[in-house]
Structures are given as C-alpha cells and as structure tokens.
C-alpha cells in the first residue's frame, strides 16, 4: 500500500480531439507546399512571435536584446531555431498515422522546455496561433475553412502533448515533499552548510553530514554537486588532452627522426644500387671487348689458314708442272 499524500494533484485535462483520415490528408498536402520554403516560413513565425510578444525573448539569450525585425531575420541563430521548429512539425506531420511516435516526440519537446528551459506553457498556445496566421498568409486562397479546421485540431493536439510534460513535472515536484522552500532560502541554507563544514575543518572537529534538505533545496544542492562534478571532469579532460598533446608531440618528433633515418638509409641503398649497376656495366663492357678480341683473332687465323692453303696449292701446281716438264724432256 502506498502512503497517503496530502498533496492535491492537478486535475486531468480533456484529451485533444484526434484528426480523421481526411484531415490528415489535408494537413499533409498543405504542409508539403509550406515545407518547400521551411526556413523562410519558420523565420516569419518566430519574428512575428517575438515582435508581438516580446516577453517570450527572455528564454533566448542569443536574441534577447534584438528589437528590430530585420535584425532578427538576419540572425543565424534565429534561423537555426526556426529550422528546428519546422523540422519538429515536419516529423509530426509525416507520422500522423503513428500517434505513439508523435506523442513520444512531443513529450521530449515538452520535457526539455519544462525542465531545462523553464518556459511557461502559455507561450505554446500563443505560438500555435502565430503559426496558423503565417500559414493562412502563405497558403492564401488554399487556406479554406476545412484546412483551417484541420490545422487548428493539429495545433490543439501539439499543445496537449507538450503541456502534458508540464503536468507530470508539477506532480513529481509536489510529491517530492510538502516541506519545499523557495530557491533563495535553499541557497542560503547551502551557504550555511558550507560555512559549517569550513568551521569544523578549522577547529579540527570530525566532519559530519549536515541535515538533509527537502524539495527545491535538495534539487538545488544536487544541481550544484553535478556542476562540481562536471568541472572536475573538464579539468581531467584538459589535463589528459595536454598530456596527450605532449605525448603526441614527442611521438611526432620520434616519427620524424625515424622517417629521416629511413630516408637516409634509402638514399644509401640507392647509392649502393647505382654503384653495383656501374660495376655490372663495366664487367659487361670488358666481356664484350674480350669477345670482340677473340673474334678478331679467329678471323685472322682463318685468313692465315686460307692464305696458307692457297700457297700449298700453288706449290703443288708448280711441282706438277716441273714433273710434266721432266717427263717431256725424257721422252725427247
């Protein structure tokens, strides 16, 4: 059994009326025309929103001091935010057949604006009316009564899902404890706790935990602890990055030295190869010269043999002639 809680929870809201298949088709067809120039339409929506309701600029530090509409139109940060708004609407329009996905996307948007940015929910109602005005101007004659009814239903659906996150956040805050105090008192309590710890450390008393905090004070204390942890992590990351950069510089110098040594070795190897090539060429030349000399000697020997053979033949012919002459003389 859960313990009884004296906190009165907010009343349940009436659920937004869902869109029919015809209305979904109308919204998707008209949105396709608008989304062709989504950035310009989104900028027009935000500029009109901030000009007509300047109190909404308190949640945007980037263009909080901008009053001129032309200056707002030129702002790159405003254009980025306009693109985010138009892309969120685009995801909703594309997934109108899947209500679970639509509700999950819009719940994330609502929680971000409720918890992180602390935006009042009435501004979503105002923004939806501004979007309808800009759509009617952009579509012109195509913005008929049927189109207006479909888009009004869609804006009501968006508002219902987004503000649901605000109701959940309020219930969680009320259930956290009825002893919650204002943020100013919570900060004073935290300062007193820190002074108490410092006094104990100075006197030499063993450090004890201060009394527990409740409600907004506890939330503020947790946020402060988280900030301290984030700062420590950032310092560690910076140290690691510095050490990594120093190591990287040393490694880079070592790599450069190794590359230079490798280049020197490559140059020496190339010089050795060149010397070996030169030696091989010299050997080939010597061998060629020797072969040429041997061939010349062989030719000379062949010529001498030919000449010797011819002389022997001449001698034989002369001897035969002499023999023939002797025979003739004998016959006579």
Image (tube, rainbow, N blue to C red):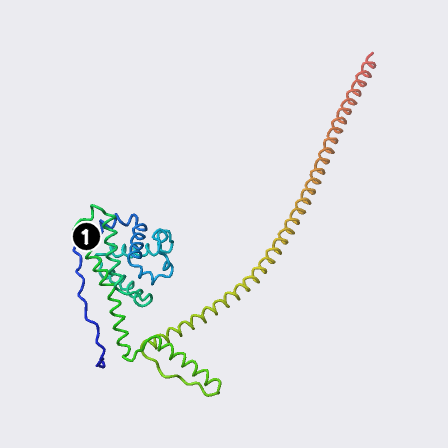
* The C terminus: image quadrant: top right
Nearest the viewer among 309 and 32 is 32
Quadrant housing residue 326: top right
Secondary structure at numbered mark 1: helix
- Name the side, left or right, on which 329 lies relative to 56: right
Dividing the picture into quadrants, the one containing residue 289 is top right
Q: How many marks?
A: 1
Which of these two is toward me, 329 or 117?
117
Q: Residues within 10 Å of mark 1 (few under 14, many from 20)?
A: some
| Residue under the image location 49 percent in, 85 percent down | 202
Q: Is residue 171 above or below residue 199?
A: above
Residue 1 in the image, given as x and y percentages of width and height: 21, 81
Q: Residue at x 74, y 28 (%)?
A: 303
When the figure is inspected, residue 218 is found, relative to residue 96, above or below; the finding is below
Residue extending furthest toward the front: 67
> Where does residue 19 sit, x and y in percent of width and height?
18, 57
Q: Is residue 33 above or below residue 115?
A: above
Q: Is residue 282 left or right of residue 330?
A: left
Q: Residue at x 52, y 65 (%)?
A: 242
Mark 1, residue position: 148
- Name the foreground residue: 53 vs 175: 53
On the image, which quarter does residue 298 sit in? top right
Residue 3 x, y percent position in the rendering: 23, 81
Q: Residue 327 or 77: which is nearer the viewer?
A: 77
């Amino acid at each position: 059994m859960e313990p009884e809680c004296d906190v009165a929870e907010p009343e349940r809201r009436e659920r937004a009326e869902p869109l029919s298949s015809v209305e979904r088709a109308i919204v998707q067809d008209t949105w396709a025309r608008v989304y062709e120039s989504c950035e310009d339409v989104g900028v027009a929506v935000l500029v009109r929103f901030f000009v007509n309701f300047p109190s909404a600029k308190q949640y945007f530090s980037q263009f909080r001091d901008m009053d001129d509409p032309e200056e707002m139109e030129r702002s790159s940060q405003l254009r980025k935010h306009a693109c985010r708004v138009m892309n969120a609407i685009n995801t909703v329009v594309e997934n109108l057949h899947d209500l679970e996905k639509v509700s999950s996307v819009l719940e994330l948007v609502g929680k971000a604006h409720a918890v992180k940015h602390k935006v009042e929910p009435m501004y979503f109602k105002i923004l939806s009316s501004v979007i309808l005005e800009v759509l009617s101007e952009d579509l012109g004659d195509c913005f008929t009564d049927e189109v207006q009814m479909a888009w009004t239903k869609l804006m009501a659906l968006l508002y219902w899902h987004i503000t649901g996150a605000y109701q959940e956040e309020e219930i969680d805050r009320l259930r956290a404890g009825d002893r919650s105090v204002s943020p100013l008192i919570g900060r004073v309590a935290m300062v007193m706790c820190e002074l108490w710890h410092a006094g104990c450390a100075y006197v030499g008393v063993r450090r004890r935990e201060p009394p527990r905090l409740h409600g907004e004070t506890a939330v503020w204390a947790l946020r402060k602890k988280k900030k301290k942890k984030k700062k420590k992590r950032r310092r560690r990351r910076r140290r690691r990055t510095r050490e990594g950069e120093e190591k990287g510089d040393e490694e880079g110098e070592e790599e450069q030295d190794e590359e230079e040594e490798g280049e020197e070795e490559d140059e020496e190897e190339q010089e050795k190869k060149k010397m070996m090539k030169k030696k091989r060429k010299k050997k080939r030349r010597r061998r060629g010269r020797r072969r040429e000399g041997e061939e010349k000697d062989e030719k000379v020997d062949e010529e001498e043999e030919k000449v010797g053979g011819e002389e022997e033949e001449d001698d034989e012919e002369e001897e035969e002639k002499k023999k023939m002459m002797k025979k003739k003389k004998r016959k006579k």
